[in-house]
Image (cartoon, grey):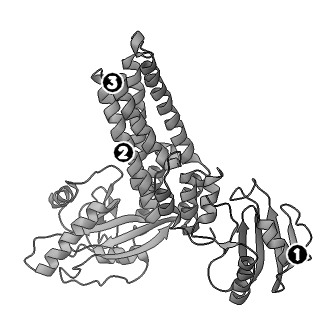
Amino acid sequence: MRNDTIAAVSTPAGMGGVAVLRVSGAGALDVVLPLLEPATPLPPRRASLRTLAGIDQGLAVYLPAPNSYTGEDTVELSCHGSLYVQQALLQALLDAGARLAEPGEFTRRAFLNGRLNLSQAEAVADLIEAATPTQHRLATSQLRGAYANELKALRQQLVDLTSLMELELDFSQEDVEFADRGTLLGLVTQLQDRVQGLLGSFATGNALKRGVPVAILGRPNAGKSTLLNALLGDERAIVSPIPGTTRDTIEETMTIDGITFRFIDTAGLRQSDDALEALGIERSIKAARQATILLYVRNITMPFDDYALTDITDITDECDMRNKHIFFVHNKCDLPHKSNPPGHIVSAKEGIGIDSLKESMVAVIKNDAAANDGVLISNLRHYEALGRTRDALRHVAEGLERQMPADLVAVDLRDALYHLGSITGDVTSNELLQNIFSRFCVGK
């Protein structure tokens, strides 16, 4: 890490009522004080009204190390949001000896100075991008360390296991065994279960972060497009009595009770000789296999036969059904019908049962989020690292079962430790850090 002083505009690009410039580094005060009028010392953690570089009048706040965001001496300047004022003040800071910060460099310094671990630093980016209450809660939970604490506990258990193996290596000539192999295998199995639980939470965490995908499926003329319009409260999809009107997927998003859902209207499921319709049906099946929620729509006035179950089986045959929810939606209940089969009975045309369907979708996602002790994985990098941790633990378990030498088992344990540590930053490389922090905006 460079020890120089960096500066940047931290508020979004453009005009506004107020803009904030951030200066961080050992020389932050040396850069800022000569630009202030009066140039008297800044009291720690108190806002002082000053003239800023003869350009504007605003507030200056001094946050001494180590109790600042970056862990370094930091000064934040609040000025009027004029583009000219922002750029002129930033140029004055650069002329006084600061360097323009790179993307994510403030947060990178916070990580390198021990103010945040790597998973918390990544949560900062998620918090900035959060557009719904659920996304905000997910990012805030990770930033506050709930997820990091879980990983820390897992890593400590791995360290303890590795230490026992290393001790056996140190005393290999004395043929000493520091722990029963069966006991060690039990501990490894517990770790495997917890890692697998975290991996299983990725489907829910990623869906909450990016929007829960909901595929609307069914035979032609079941009312799928009408249902999409009813859910959105808008005439988004073309509705027609002619079978096969929808030939491609149509996607729209909306937020319900703080959760973003991505609704995907699909082509009707049937055998078709029409090349375009067949392509649309193929895309429908692909969308369904990637969705978290499947809404299978059928006409309630038609006999409830096995075709619906056959369609669902064909679609989900190659799917991991964990964290996937299927709702049977019996549409057109405003028309005469003889039975009320299990599922959601609605009239998309008249808006009957739509609110109840929305409530059920929200409920299953909230239940998924509450599972796994509320700790959710939403970062693909973390998911991949946990997958490698799981694989290494599997090799450890196999080694213990086969009574393999301690040095070979220890290799796999160290491998698991490495991959788990790469999530929190206990194990890092310059390439990894550059890849993560380059995605941040300048000034954060």
Question: As rendered, which of 381 and 407 lies closer to the eye?
Answer: 407
The C terminus - image quarter? bottom right
Q: Quadrant of residue 165?
A: top left
Q: Position of residue 297 (x, y in %)?
A: 27, 67
User: Residue at label 3?
Assistant: 400
Looking at the image, tell me whether mark 3 or mark 2 is earlier in sequence order: 2
Q: Position of residue 368 (x, y in %)?
A: 44, 51
User: Residue at label 2?
Assistant: 388
**Cβ atoms under marks 3 and 1 closer than 8 Å:** no
The N terminus - image quarter? bottom right
User: Residue at label 1?
Assistant: 49
Real-space Cα separation, disc 3 to disc 1, in angstroms: 67 Å
Q: Position of residue 310 (x, y in %)?
A: 16, 57
Q: Residue at x 43, y 66 (%)?
A: 211
Q: Is residue 395 left or right of residue 444?
A: left
Q: Is residue 155 left or right of residue 88?
A: left
Real-space Cα separation, disc 2 to disc 1, in angstroms: 53 Å
Residue 236 visible:
yes
Q: Label 2 amino acid? A: Arg
Q: Say which mark, if any, is on residue 245.
A: none
Q: Label 1 amino acid? A: Leu
Q: Position of residue 25 (x, y in %)?
A: 72, 63
For residue 307, above or below residue 370: below
